[in-house]
Amino acid sequence: MPSVSQTLRLVVIAPDSLQPDAGDDYAIEQAERSRALRIGLLEAGYNIVAVLPTDTFLAERLAQLQPDMIIVDAESEARDALEHVVVASRDARRPIVMFTNDDDTTHVKDAVAAGVSAYVVAGLSPERIRPILEVAMARFQHEQELRRELAHARSELNDRKLVDRAKGVLMQRQGMSEADAYAKMRRAAMDRGLKLGEVAQRILDVADLLG
């Protein structure tokens, strides 16, 4: 993941068209807002690699494009757009920044819980774009580090449980002391280039087979 000082590759999730029907005032307003956001992103130095709709191919397109960040440009359909994006990016997490003029903030909490790094309601000006995206990237990277640390802690806890069970098997079946059982497992791990937890799992697997 690039640092915030480098040019980020963005995918913008936005309304399908910037050229709505002339008589549709609402669509015209949304098109102008969406155009202004994209211009602001470009002027801030970001690289917009694609503008995509929230359709069934979104996950595939994101996998192909591998953007650094996803920008969701949504109005009253913000909840539906966000759900599509979260589902499409769940296998490869990326920071998500949502820009909307929808003043219904009842689902902001759900959006943040779903993985949105920044949720920006109205009042967008070009000079605000870079700080918003930099903070969103920093927050995402911090959360990813916390996730890695949690996963590592869970893995270590699981390994300790496996080692304790495997020591019990060796102590029971080979009459070893706890210290000797642990030493034997450590030697086996070093000799085979395995983690202690992997050796413990093999011992337990063999014990299950032998009954």
Image (cartoon, grey):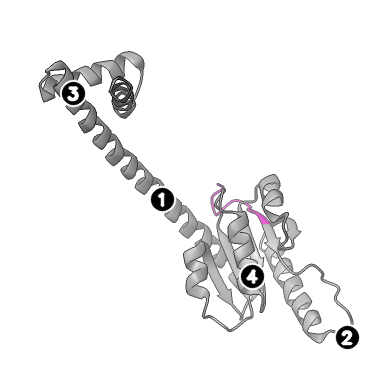
- Is disc 1 placed on a helix, strand or loop? helix
Q: Give amino acid for label 4.
A: Asp
Of the image marks 1 and 4, the number of the one nearer the N terminus: 4
- Is disc 3 placed on a helix, strand or loop? helix
Q: CA distance from mark 2 to mark 3?
A: 78 Å
Of the image marks 3 and 4, the number of the one nearer the N terminus: 4
Of the image marks 2 and 3, the number of the one nearer the N terminus: 2
- For residue 182, the mark is 3
Q: Look at 58% across and 65% down and name the residue there.
A: 97
Q: Look at 73% across and 61% down and name the residue there.
A: 55
* Quarter of image, res 184: top left
Marks 2 & 3, CB-CB < 8 Å contact: no
Marks 1 & 4, CB-CB < 8 Å contact: no
Residue 172 falls left or right of residue 24: left
Mark 1 vs mark 4: give the one in front: 4
Q: Give amino acid for label 1.
A: Arg
Q: Residue 112: x and y, percent? A: 49, 67
**The one of 112 and 120 positioned closer to us in this rendering:** 112
Residue 127 seen from this side:
no
